[in-house]
């Protein structure tokens, strides 16, 4: 398990609280929590390091991993709600503002198809922004 890249999921509940965890099996349990995505990510990494050191002392196995943090749709929308307006997201995705609002608040979760539609729209917008000359 050395130098492995592992996906860590970032989710946000309806109270705006973030959780980070890995779906892949690790040699020890690890998750992070926080009021922001950044706080949950930092908590996750701190706990991982503490658990890694404990595992090394107990087993002699040095587990080294890199994490690729992946937002679920609701967590992404919640995290960036101050930068991406519902009106703008609605224009980008073709999804009405009320439905997007439910995803941001966590009262509903998008289907995998709708989540993919949001993801592709935001990625296309990001690509357009990266090509903009100012």
Image (cartoon, rainbow, N blue to C red):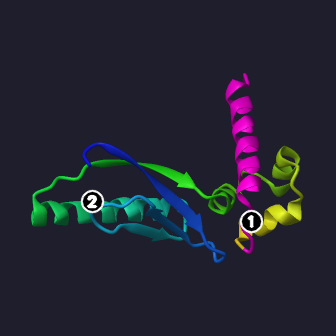
**Position of 69 compared to 75: left or right?**
left
> Percent from the top left, x then y, of residue 117?
76, 48
Q: Which mark is residue 29?
A: none
Q: Nearer the viewer, residue 31 or 22?
A: 22
Picture layout, residue 109 above or below residue 5: below
Q: Quadrant of residue 132?
A: top right
Helix, strand or loop at label 2? It is helix
Decide whether residue 130 is among the magenta residues. yes
Against 95, residue 99 (above or below) is below
Residue positioned 51% across, 68% down in the render:
19
Residue under label 1, please give it. 103
Instruction: Count residues near mark 1 (Cα–Cα under 10 Å), then give few for <14, some for 14-19, many for 20+.
Output: many
Q: Which residues are magenta?
A: 107-134
Where disc 1 sits, the SS reads helix
Can you give x and y, in whole percent of width and height, for residue 40 in the image?
47, 65
Q: How crowded is the residue under tag 2: few (<14 C-alpha within 10 Å), some, or many (20+)?
A: some
Based on the displayed image, in which of its 4 quarters is residue 112 positioned? bottom right
Give the side of residue 58 with respect to residue 126, left or right: left
* Residue shown at the point (33%, 69%) measured from the top left: 29
x, y percent for residue 27: 27, 62
- Residue 35 or residue 66, whichever sits in front: 66
Distance (Cα) linking label 2 and label 1: 32 Å
Residue in the picture at 67% in, 55% down: 80
């Amino acid at each position: 398990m050395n130098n492995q890249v592992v996906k860590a999921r970032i989710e946000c509940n309806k109270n705006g609280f973030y959780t980070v965890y890995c779906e892949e099996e690790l040699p020890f349990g690890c998750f992070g929590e926080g009021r922001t995505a950044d706080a949950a990510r930092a908590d996750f990494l701190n706990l991982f390091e503490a658990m890694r050191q404990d595992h090394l002392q107990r087993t002699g196995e040095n587990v080294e991993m890199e994490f690729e943090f992946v937002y679920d749709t609701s967590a992404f929308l919640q995290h960036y709600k101050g930068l991406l307006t519902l009106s703008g997201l609605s224009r980008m995705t073709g999804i009405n503002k009320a439905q997007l609002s439910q995803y941001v608040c966590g009262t509903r979760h998008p289907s995998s198809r709708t989540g993919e539609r949001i993801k592709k729209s935001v990625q296309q917008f990001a690509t357009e922004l990266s090509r903009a000359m100012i």
